[in-house]
């Protein structure tokens, strides 16, 4: 269940927003001051903050500043007074992700909450993907996409353009098996009408090139029977 921290000092707004968000399936925490909110934001942090600008003690802006100063990347929606353009600009500059203007419709608020949470999930997934180390290509094999040259142990392989494309594609996904159809799509493109055996022919030629540079290297280009082909690290 996603947790939302509502920082708001006006009881009618607190109860209306809390009730609606709970009905929508969120868990709602409430803080009636910025100071109280600060005690609730450390990890495991809420998934989203709804922050009223006008609070007793430190105001919503100062709270937002402190949240960001702690390096917390929680999505924040500011609740601003009607027509207060300055509040909106300041809030966004301080790192608010969105704002709603009082009096706001609960439906509008929920829509913005959902949109921001969706975006936060996407960003988190993207970060995780970027942080995952990409598997390295087989070390002995060097691919230079700019010059369209491949070499094995420093020996240039005299590849035809499609042979190079096929090798470069497999080398970008070391250890991963691709069907002949997938390779046709990825390497030759969908526009050409080609038989899957085209892939077999190119694989055979590639193996011959690899073997010419290093007899053991032909085994790098493996056949997974009934499935397809993969390129693996050369075994010593
Ligand atoms: Ca207030």
Image (cartoon, rainbow, N blue to C red):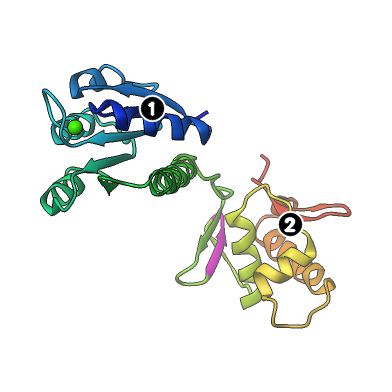
| Crowding at mark 2 (Cα within 10 Å: few <14, some 14-19, many 20+) | some
Image quadrant containing the C terminus: top right
Residue 133 makes an appearance in the image? yes
Q: Is residue 34 above or below residue 106?
A: above
Measuring from the top left, give residue 166's x and y in whole percent.
66, 67
Measuring from the top left, give residue 224's x and y in whole percent.
82, 51
Q: Earlier in the sequence, mark 2 or mark 1?
A: 1
Foreground mark, 2 or 1, reads 1
Task: Name the dominant secondary structure of the magenta segment.
Answer: strand
From the viewer's side, name the closer residue of 19 and 41. Answer: 19
- Is 1 displayed left or right of 10 in the figure? right
- Is 60 displayed left or right of 151 in the figure? left
Residue 46 got which mark? 1
Q: Which residue is mark 2?
A: 178
Measuring from the top left, give residue 23's x and y in whole percent.
51, 33
Residue displayed at 19% across by 19% down: 35
Dots 2, 1 in contact, CB < 8 A: no
| Crowding at mark 1 (Cα within 10 Å: few <14, some 14-19, many 20+) | some
Residue displayed at 73% across by 64% down: 182
Residue furthest to the right in view is 226
**Which span of residues is magenta-colored?**
149-153
From the viewer's side, name the closer residue of 16 and 131. Answer: 16
Q: In which image quadrant can residue 43 be found?
A: top left
């Amino acid at each position: 269940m996603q947790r939302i921290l509502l920082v708001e000092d006006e009881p009618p707004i607190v109860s209306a927003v809390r009730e609606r968000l709970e009905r929508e399936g969120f868990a709602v925490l409430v803080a009636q001051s910025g100071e109280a909110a600060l005690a609730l934001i450390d990890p495991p942090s809420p998934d989203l903050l709804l922050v009223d600008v006008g609070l007793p003690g430190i105001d919503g802006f100062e709270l937002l500043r402190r949240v960001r100063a702690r390096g917390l990347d929680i999505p924040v929606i500011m609740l601003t007074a009607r027509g207060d353009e300055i509040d909106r600009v300041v809030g966004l500059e301080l790192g608010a992700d969105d704002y709603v203007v009082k009096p706001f419709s609960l439906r509008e608020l929920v829509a913005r909450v959902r949109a921001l949470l969706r975006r936060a999930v996407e960003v988190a997934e993207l970060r995780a993907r970027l942080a995952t180390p990409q598997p390295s290509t087989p070390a002995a094999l060097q691919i230079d996409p700019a010059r369209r040259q491949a070499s094995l142990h420093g020996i240039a392989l005299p590849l035809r353009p499609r042979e190079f494309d096929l090798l470069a594609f497999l080398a970008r996904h070391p250890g991963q098996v691709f069907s002949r159809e997938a390779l046709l799509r990825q390497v030759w493109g969908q526009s050409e009408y080609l038989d899957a055996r085209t892939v077999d022919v190119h694989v055979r030629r590639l193996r011959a090139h690899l073997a010419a540079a290093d007899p053991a290297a032909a085994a790098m280009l493996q056949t997974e029977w009934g499935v397809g082909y993969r390129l693996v690290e050369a075994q010593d």
